[in-house]
Image (tube, rainbow, N blue to C red):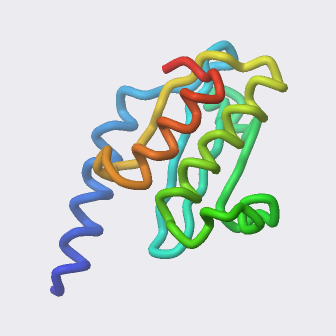
């Protein structure tokens, strides 16, 4: 078993442990963040109905056109602002932040900071 397999297993174990306590409702949905090696994805999810209410990712054209897209952290910050703006347009101001087992620094923290700047409360 390689080092990456151990890291992935540890992340999935953290994710499982965290998700036991996090539940997104219609009044306070869950802001989920997934980080791949190249991109970052964010979704606002209502767990009761199992629906994604709002989504944003670094794959979108609007994000790629930003001047700071060369940096993955800058792109993650913009994705956070984008998800925050879209959530507020839908009338969602309070969310529960789900980091998906990833450590809260770097790109995950940048998404969080961007969403807070846009006006989301968590």
Above or below residue 7? Residue 5 is below
Q: Residue at x 18, y 72 (%)?
A: 6
Q: Residue at x 43, y 28 (%)?
A: 22
Q: Farthest residue toward the top?
A: 27
Disc tally is 0
Front residue of this view, candidates 36 and 109: 109
Residue 33, how many percent across, how many down? 51, 48
Residue 65 image-quadrant placement = bottom right
Residue 61 image-quadrant placement = bottom right
Q: Residue at x 64, y 44 (%)?
A: 43
Residue 39, how many percent across, how many down? 56, 68
Residue 120, how many percent across, how many down? 60, 23
Q: Is residue 81 left or right of residue 87?
A: left
Front residue of this view, candidates 52 and 90: 90
Above or below residue 21? Residue 86 is below
Front residue of this view, candidates 34 and 39: 39
Q: Farthest residue toward the bottom?
A: 2
Above or below residue 95? Residue 85 is below
Residue 57, how many percent across, how many down? 67, 57
Q: Is residue 3 left or right of residue 63?
A: left
Q: Residue at x 65, y 36 (%)?
A: 45
Q: Is residue 18 left or right of residue 75?
A: left
Screen quadrant of the N terminus: bottom left
Q: Is residue 76 left or right of residue 50?
A: left
């Amino acid at each position: 078993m390689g080092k990456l397999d151990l890291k992935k297993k540890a992340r999935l174990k953290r994710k499982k442990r965290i998700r036991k306590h996090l539940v997104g409702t219609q009044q306070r949905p869950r802001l989920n963040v997934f980080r791949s090696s190249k991109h970052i994805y964010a979704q606002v999810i209502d767990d009761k109905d199992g629906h994604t209410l709002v989504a944003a990712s670094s794959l979108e054209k609007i994000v790629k056109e930003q001047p700071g897209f060369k940096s993955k952290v800058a792109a993650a910050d913009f994705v956070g602002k984008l998800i925050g703006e879209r959530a507020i347009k839908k009338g969602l101001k309070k969310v529960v932040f789900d980091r998906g087992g990833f450590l809260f620094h770097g790109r995950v923290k940048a998404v969080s900071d961007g969403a807070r700047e846009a006006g989301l409360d968590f």
